[in-house]
Each structure stands twice: as C-alpha cells, then as structure tokens.
Amino acid sequence: MAKFEQVKALTFDLFGTVLDLGGSLTPFIGEMLKEQGADVSVQDFWQQWRYRQRLEQFQDTIMMLGHSGYLETVRRAFVYVLKLNKIVLSPDEVKTFLACWQELSPFPEVRSGLEKLKDRYKLVGLSNGDPAFLDHLAKNRIQWDFDAVISVTQMGAFKPHPAVYRRAAHLLELEVGECMMVSANSFDVVGARACGLRGAFVNRYALPYEDTHLQPDVVVNDFGELADALV
C-alpha cells in the first residue's frame, strides 16, 4: 500500500517553505542598514519585518476592507519596521529597495525533492503571493513547472482563512482530504488541517508547533526528508 494513498495533491506554501526568504533578503537588508548607519542588526531587522508582515496579513483579512495583496503587506511592514528603528527612507527609496523581493531563491534541496515527488502527486503552489509575482517566482526563481500555482488573491483573504484551502481543493477537483498542505509555517498547517486537508510540517526553523489537536501527519526538516516520508 502506498504512503498516504488517499492524497493526490501536495499544496506547497512558497514563502519560507520553498523560497528562502531570510537567505535571499538579508544581504539586501545588511547593505541598506550599513548605508543608513542603523544600529539594529540584520537578523533583528529581518525578524521584525517578517513578524510585522504576518500581522499585516492577519489584520488585512480580519478587517475585511478589501484584499490588499501580498506585496502591499510587505511594503506596510517594511515601513513600520523602518519607523521602529528610526530609519528614514523616502517612498521612492522604499520602492527601489523592495525590488529585492524579485530576487528570492529556493532552498537548495527543493528541486531535487520535488523531482522525487512529481510522479506520485500533483505538485501545486498555494501561496499568499500576488498572481503575477508568483508566476515570476515559479518560472524564473524556483524554475519549476508546478501542476498549478494558486494565489489567495482569488479568495480575497490570506492563509489561514478556510476559503483558501477549500477553494484550492475545489479548483483541483479534489476532496479536501485528497490534498496535503506542505508548509514551514505551523499556522498554515493548522489552518489546512482544520479544513480537512492532511498536513506536512517542514520545520526548517526548529520552531514549536501550535498547541492544538490538529497535528501534522508528517514532520520533516527539509524537502529531502519530505520526499522520503511521502514516496
């Protein structure tokens, strides 16, 4: 009997799971902080930015004033963290700096892991990113031809909103239980599990999982271990 025989599609989080945000962005952050003579460390600035962006996403969904889009939450969070650290950049300088998000790169073992999984499952990107941005990342940065890349833009809410996971399964013409969410963000796995998807937690950052009965079916450290667990 095949492992997870009922699962037909793996839906992958991209930001932080497939794409190495910290490794890709911290060189740009370091250069900017040096130019500005800022006291904050690169890692502290990045952590503040990442946490604030998640808060911006959650607020965006909860307030229901209209879906702002991923890159807009990136911008808002960046401006907030600049103010937090008393760094002054003009709107044009902010826009120029944020072009660094176009240079995101995948973790080194991602493509080899996907190669091992592709014959057994549909491989689908399920991301908070904006559609055109995701197209660029899949084609030019990840360089992988996913069976589908689904943006939350069409659901009008960021993960972990239930509509994201349910709509993704619907678009794939699958039952929710035939999909497995693969994410390095534990809230993403919990959100998917709450909707009836299976879940794989890629614990790249050695972080604790949520205090919930909605546990992942698989816990691994990277995509090599993921392929071993699922094939």
Image (cartoon, grey):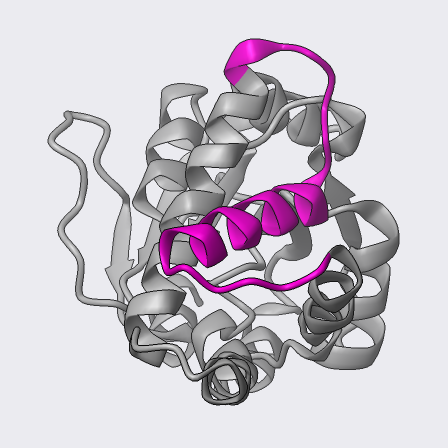
Which quarter of the figure is the N terminus placed in? bottom left
Quick check: 73 above or below 89? above
Where residue 173 sits: x, y (%)? 76, 28
Residue pictured at 15% horizontal, 25% vertical? 213
Residue 206 is covered by the magenta coloring = no
Looking at the image, residue 10 sits to the left or right of residue 49; the answer is right
Q: Classify the position of the C terminus by image quarter.
A: bottom left
Q: Quadrant of residue 42?
A: bottom left
Q: Residue 101 in the image: x percent, y percent?
A: 68, 69
Whether residue 68 is situated above or below residue 84 in the rendered picture = above
Q: Quadrant of residue 63?
A: top right
Looking at the picture, tell me which residue is in the foreground, 50 or 173.
Answer: 50
In this view of the protein, can residue 184 be seen by the observer? Answer: no
Which residue is situated farthest in the top direction here?
Answer: 64
- In this view of the protein, can residue 128 be seen by the observer? yes
| Quadrant in which residue 196 is drawn | top left
Residue range of the region highlighted in magenta in the rendering: 62-90
